[in-house]
Amino acid sequence: MLKVIDSAVPIACWSCSVAHNDATLFCPHCSKIQPPTGGDYFSVFGIEPRLDLDLNALESEFHRLSRKLHPDRFARAGENEKQWSLADTALLNDAYRTLKDPITRTEYLLKLRGAEIAELHAGKDRKGQDDPSRVPADLLEEVFDLNMQLEEMRMARQAEETDVVLEASLTEAKKKFDGLLNAVNKDLRAQWKVWDEGDATARQAAQSTMVKLLDRRRYLSNLVRDVTETLGA
Amino acid sequence: MAEGRVVGIDLGTTNSLVAYMEGDKPVVIPGVDGSNLVPSVVALDPIPAEGGRPTVTVGNSARKSLIETPERVIYSVKRLMGRDLSEVQSELKLFPFRLADDVEAGEVPRIQLGELRFTAPEISAYILRQLKRNAERFFGAPVTQAVITVPAYFNDAQRQATKDAGRMAGLEVLRLVNEPTAAALAYGLDRANVGTIAVYDLGGGTFDISILKLRDGIFEVQSTNGDTHLGGDDIDNLLLAIALDEIHAEHGVDLRAHPSAVQAVRKSAIEAKIRLSTEAAAHFDIELPNGDRYQREIPREVFEQLIEPVLDRTVGPCKQALTDAGLTPEQIDAVVLVGGSTRIPAVSQLVDDLFHLAARGKKPYIELNPDEVVALGAAVQADILAGASKTTDEMLLLDVTPLSLGIEALGGTVARIIQRNSTIPASATEHFTTGVDGQTNVAIHVVQGERELAADCRSLARFDLKGIPPMSAGLPRIEVKFLIDADGILQVSAREQRSGQAAKIEVKPTYGLTDEQVESMILDSFDHAEEDFAKRLLIEARNEAETILSAVERAPESPAWAQLTGEEQAAISAARDRLASVKLGEDAPAIRNATLALDQATRRFAELMMEAAVTTAIRGKTMDAADEDLGDELTAPHPMAPAEFK
């Protein structure tokens, strides 16, 4: 008969056979590493899903868990323990990488909640940038002008000419889009608060707002990147 | 499980080293010749008259054959590690690698050495075996586990090839560690350092830049970048090309048709390069086969102009690494210089400019010998892995993958699944489905690199997901898990979710050796046997004794002998007689001790000879001639000799 230590499903430790909570990384009795249990990125850090995170605390916890789980600590262990440490550490690293960045963290949480988020794969991003249906409606005219200027600039560069007026105009445009990007970031942060503190209905609303904001943000940051690249070329 | 010592190995393009933790300090283990550096040169001795397989020599002794029998010697083999035929073409123009010409595309290239052929991992295995033996001789016990360093910018195939080499040499490779990270470990050992450091590592054939954050013993790599085909070799080749062209133009001799003559010029070029790090000018003085002399003075300014394009190639990777880490040059607290090529003053100047060091009252860190620091760091990592050490108990290295991992998508574009500079181990899960009703196979192409098109990236592997239950197109859902392990090497697993059936994956690395091939290439598999080990120790101890005895035998012929006092001469004779008698016995440690005693007794004599040789060298003789004056055995390694030749 297994003794239940925690509310979660009890399983027996592979090494000492004492039963423990299946979500634990190490056996509380013999301290041996346990088979990975999966779970989302937030649970890796033992926190509930939320958007406003204390990054210093996250880093400290990342370091603490790394010290315990890293394959370097299992270099001379048995094959199973090696594999578990590898899987656990990969999950920990993936989780930390995703959660420490505010944008990937938001995207991850929204996906976790079933939202459809555009794929992030670089290389896929650039295509579709010219697709007019993706351009935020309020920016249509400016984006059109900007793309013309970018094209001119690239041609000027190719002919090794310098167009001071064009350069100034693009720098101005970059400043404007940078400003818009900052505004989106601020709006996103405001929605974090709503999501973190709100009830189910408020969360639902915040989620759909954030999906739209992320879309707009992705569009703007690609634009800023294009301008920066063209100016810096 | 063997719980012996874990050694740290720097398997370099030009030189290789083995080190271990002595208490709380990493120490390089010297070879029989007393040198810490084992030149990464492998020579195939002539086939013995009585037949059988010829023996292979490694290091300084192999280097000696380079001029006499260049077709039996190979150096800089690291440039070929993990590369296929099409990738090595550019190297063939610059390096005298002789590839077997009947190798098919996709096969691992084989290098012709005399009458035999070897893959690059096999050649590297000979170097590793030499290091292993040096360590075993030092400990008087077998060594079976090691940490081996690789350039941070090595791709999957290059890493796998290095691991294969370890296995062939009879070493269990507990971890591959990135060279710049290893250097950071060596530096970070004795300081309670908190801060952000950059490691600029310009070696014989590779360049790496890594940016790390140090906090509470955790070394967290933020970003890395580099070029696996950029290093001191390129500088040597520039000097070599100029000399060969000028010799051709001025003396009408095309040395390129004479491999041994090219090696002689190359040797002079390397000597000139090394001298230019400390002197304002260096000169070539080479005797040509037709009796003419090629003489040429190279002022440092000319040299610096010449190498500028090579050094400039390190700038882009440094800037990219900073950008990827989200840092400005001012946010870098310290820059560590690693690799023999960083002794060139123009290199430290470039680093100074890049990271605005002088403006901030800082200097690059060069306190640890740039030739040894990577091996020392490897020893630290070996100690961490061995566990139960107070010194390294709190230390942990969190490294990153240098290159993005992607899958070829429709239209030949790359869908990136793990971004470069992700902390490893890292994983990604992707879902695949079928495009045709009843389809049971799905082919997946994994690539590594930053380019948009799969064709421009390094092809890592092609996988066939087999045994998918026949279903309508688009219905199967195959989950494939990609995992980059702590060595930076990819592992893949897959399962079909809808049927619950594990899809069978057949991993076909685009390049590399199969398990069976590696197995068949394992060098002398008797290596582990205790009895053989004892025998080998005895043979090696006797060989060493023989070497020093014959050197001492010739000693009275040297003018330096007369400078010794009668007492000193008597001490040498006594130590010699003692060794000669002990050598007849079977006691390897006793022979070694007697050898050391004789070595000790002849120390002043060696110094006197060294002084004489240095004077000769200043009079315009090459260091090689000085070498010969010294006799090979008693030569102390030239302290500033990072490259092929002392």
Image (spheres, rainbow, N blue to C red):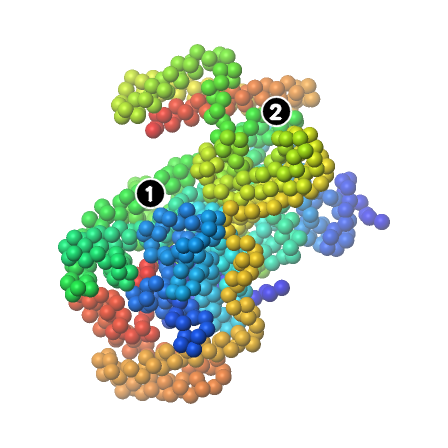
Nearest the viewer among B81 and B102 is: B102
From the viewer's perspective, tell me whether residue B566 is left or right of residue B479. Answer: left
Is disc 2 in the same subunit as disc 1?
Answer: no
- Quadrant in the rendering for residue B600: bottom left
Q: Is residue B450 visible?
A: no
From the viewer's perspective, tell me whether residue A40 is left or right of residue B511. Answer: right
- The answer to whether B401 is drawn above or below residue B538 in the figure is above
- Residue ID for mark 2: A116
The N terminus of chain B sits in image quarter: bottom right
Give the image location of residue B399, x and y in percent. Answer: 50, 46
Dot 2 amino acid type: Glu
Give the image location of residue B598, x and y in percent. Answer: 37, 81
The C terminus of chain B sits in image quarter: bottom left
> How would you rate the neighbour count of disc 2 (Cα within 10 Å): few for under 14, some for 14-19, many for 20 or more?
few
Dot 1 amino acid type: Arg
- The answer to whether B285 is drawn above or below residue A114 in the figure is below
Q: Secondary structure at mark 1?
A: loop
Give the image location of residue A195, x and y in percent. Answer: 63, 24
Nearest the viewer among B32 and B93 is: B93
Give the image location of residue A19, x and y in percent. Answer: 77, 49
Q: Secondary structure at mark 2?
A: loop
Q: Residue at x 49, y 15 (%)?
A: A132
Q: Residue at x 26, y 50 (%)?
A: B238
Image label count? 2
- The answer to whether B516 is drawn above or below residue B399 in the figure is below
Q: Residue at x 25, y 54 (%)?
A: B240
Chain letter, disc 2 residue: A
- Residue ID for mark 1: B313
- Mark-to-mark CA distance, 2 and 1: 43 Å
From the viewer's perspective, tell me whether residue B520 is left or right of residue A48. Answer: left
